[in-house]
Amino acid sequence: MKTCPLITRYPENPILTCKDVPGDAGLIFNAGVTKFNGSYVMVFRNDYDAIEADFQKEPRGKTFKTKLGLAFSADGIHWSVDPNKNILGEMLDNEIIRVYDPRLTVLNGQVYLCFAADTKHGLRGGIAVTDNFETFEVLSLSAPDNRNMALFPQLFNDKFVRLERPFPVYSRGGVDRFDMWISDSPDCVYWGNSQLLLSVEDVPFSNDKVGPGAPPVKTSSGWLTLFHAVDIERGRGKNGWENKWQKRYSAGIMLLDLENPYKIKGLSKLPLLAPEADYEISGGFRNNVIFPGGMILEPDGEVKIYYGAADTVECLATADVGDLIKLCQE
């Protein structure tokens, strides 16, 4: 499996690590990134008690302490981290254990933050909204088990639309076989009209699961949409801190219809980004992982793709929007 030659990794990757984050910091990855009020904004996942030596003592069932950090940038490359932020930290209680894996969408002058929440009774996907990154209103939390939500940056027939990845274990044979779904809502609170959008069987480089990546980007040809794809090999051994890590995460890309995002117009049958660089395949918590959480289309046609690598650091890759559209159409 190889990365598409249309992609260029930023030569000074990673762009954000624990060394850049004041205070408690460990694994810095799976960030949501957008442009808002003239600045690049990043909300990143920080598993801040993650130490390899401690993990080896508790290789099974260990849950890191996690918080969502905030950073700003003038160029989308060099970041200044707010040392005091713990976004949505007030949600933690006797039921909600942690929130993580943010995705950011600007819509109607506000920023919507999709997130995952581990609870004592299942994994839930949530949506919050802010206009200042100081206070957030939580609009909805799904029933278990659902996650990886990404919101479109416009309404369709006065409805919000989101991508998501539920966990239908029983109906998919009792094992990992998770697909990407799409739903809509009149108010970002009550969700329905849920339909299968992209299945594992549709993606040649996946045999385990597919799900949303960054929120889609609007182009004249359609909604440019990233997704994560997972393949598993039972013969894989120790690939990170864990005693056994058998999965590989890569990034794919497709094009959805401008007027009807429930319709796929084109899909690349090859990976867009596959784990190859040192920071993606070695030295991390879970090696061989690329997870795309942010995508920005610049005025000059450059596409910035932000992704977590090896569940440990945050990275950047770029491409030309025309090239990506052609890739989907081929």
Image (spheres, helix red, strand yellow):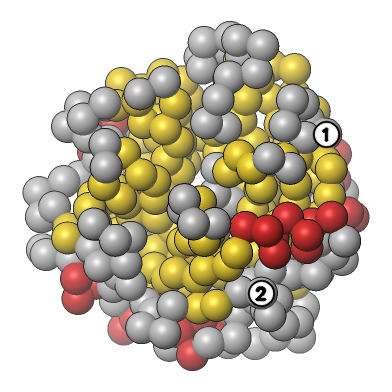
Crowd tier of the residue under label 1, counting other residues whose Cα lies within 10 Å: few below 14, some 14–19, many 20 or above: few
Amino acid carrying label 1: it is Lys
Residue at image point 21% right, 30% down: 132
Residue at image point 24% right, 72% down: 18
> Which x, y percent locates residue 196?
81, 35
Task: Quickly name the residue at label 1.
Answer: 263
Give the secondary structure at mark 2.
loop
Give the secondary structure at mark 1.
loop
Q: Give the vertical position of 171 relative to 141 (above or below).
A: below
Residue 144 appears in view: no
Q: Are marks 1 and 2 in contact (CB under 8 Å)?
A: no
Task: Quickly name the residue at label 2.
Answer: 6
**314 horizontally vs 234: left or right:** left
Crowd tier of the residue under label 2, counting other residues whose Cα lies within 10 Å: few below 14, some 14–19, many 20 or above: few
The tag earlier along the polypeptide, 1 or 2, is 2
Q: Quadrant of the C terminus?
A: bottom right
Amino acid carrying label 2: it is Leu
Residue at image point 52% right, 68% down: 318
> Which x, y percent locates residue 151?
54, 33
**145 horizontally vs 107: left or right:** right
Who is closer to the viewer here, 96 or 21? 21
Residue at image point 51% right, 17% down: 188
**48 horizontally vs 290: left or right:** left
